[in-house]
């Protein structure tokens, strides 16, 4: 059991996605996405999602991808996970849709703190 969520730009079976076992509430995900924008991570490519997963795993959770943060194709993700469902984002890492959301939003007003914590430690990607 966790506080699961999936982040993807598309529900196409082979679309890149990130599965979060913990911190899948809206306030955490908004903070993660803001950190990605602040670090110049953008786009919908597998490479962008790889960078995003690495930043979350290393600079927020203190682990490697494959422990708490998983990078996989959408068809492999637990999209209907009974916690926070799936966040669909655009190329600018903004939430544009929610799928499988069964509960109210989790707003703890900690998004800015999460983003600041990550960006203080992570490298900026300027390519």
Image (tube, helix red, strand yellow):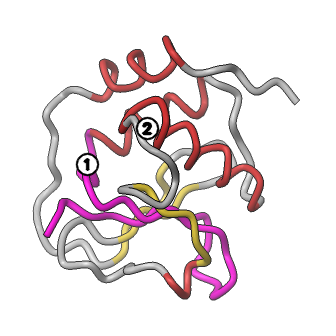
Residue 113 sits in which quadrant?
top left
Residue 114 position within the rendered picture, expressed as x and y whole percent measured from the top left? 33, 26
Q: Quadrant of the N terminus?
A: bottom left
Point 39% across, 69% down: residue: 86
Name above or below for residue 116 compared with residue 9.
Answer: above
Q: Is 53 above or below relative to 30?
A: below
Q: Residue at x 72, y 49 (%)?
A: 48
Can residue 8 be seen from the camera position used here? yes
Residue 97 showing in the rendered view: no
Task: Please report the bounds of the magenta region as a residue range.
Answer: 1-27
Report the residue that reaches farthest toward the right: 127
44 up-or-down from 23: above or below: below
Which of marks 2 and 1 precedes in the sequence?
Answer: 1
Element on which disc 2 rests: helix
Split into 4 quadrants, where in the image is the C terminus? top right
Percent across and percent down for residue 15 are 67, 75
Look at the image and say whether residue 61 sits in the magenta stretch: no
The percent position of residue 96, horizontal first and vertical second, equals 49, 57
Label drawn at residue 113: none
Say left or right for 42 vs 62.
right
Q: Quote the CA–CA distance across marks 1 and 2.
A: 10 Å
- Left or right of residue 20, residue 59 in this image: right
Counting from the top left corner in percent of width and height, residue 74 is at 56, 79
Other-residue count near label 1 (Cα within 10 Å), few / some / many at <14 / 14–19 / ≥20: some
Tell me where residue 72 sits by quadrant: bottom right
Q: Is residue 42 left or right of residue 75?
A: right
- Which mark is on residue 23? 1
Q: What is the tally of numbered marks visible in this picture? A: 2
Instruction: Please name whichever residue, 54 or 17, is drawn nearer the observer in this view of the structure.
Output: 54
| Residue sticking out furthest to the top | 120
Mark 2, residue position: 32
Q: Are marks 1 and 2 in contact (CB under 8 Å)?
A: yes
């Amino acid at each position: 059991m966790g506080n699961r969520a999936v982040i993807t730009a598309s529900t196409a079976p082979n679309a890149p996605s990130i599965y979060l076992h913990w911190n899948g509430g809206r306030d955490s995900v908004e903070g993660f996405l803001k950190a990605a924008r602040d670090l110049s991570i953008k786009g919908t490519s597998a490479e962008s999602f790889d960078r995003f997963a690495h930043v979350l795993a290393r600079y927020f959770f203190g682990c490697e991808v494959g422990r708490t943060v998983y990078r996989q194709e959408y068809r492999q993700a637990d999209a209907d996970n009974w916690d926070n469902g799936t966040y669909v984002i655009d190329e600018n890492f903004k939430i544009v849709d929610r799928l499988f959301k069964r509960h109210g939003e989790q707003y703890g007003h900690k998004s800015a703190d999460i983003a600041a914590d990550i960006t203080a430690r992570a490298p900026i990607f300027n390519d």
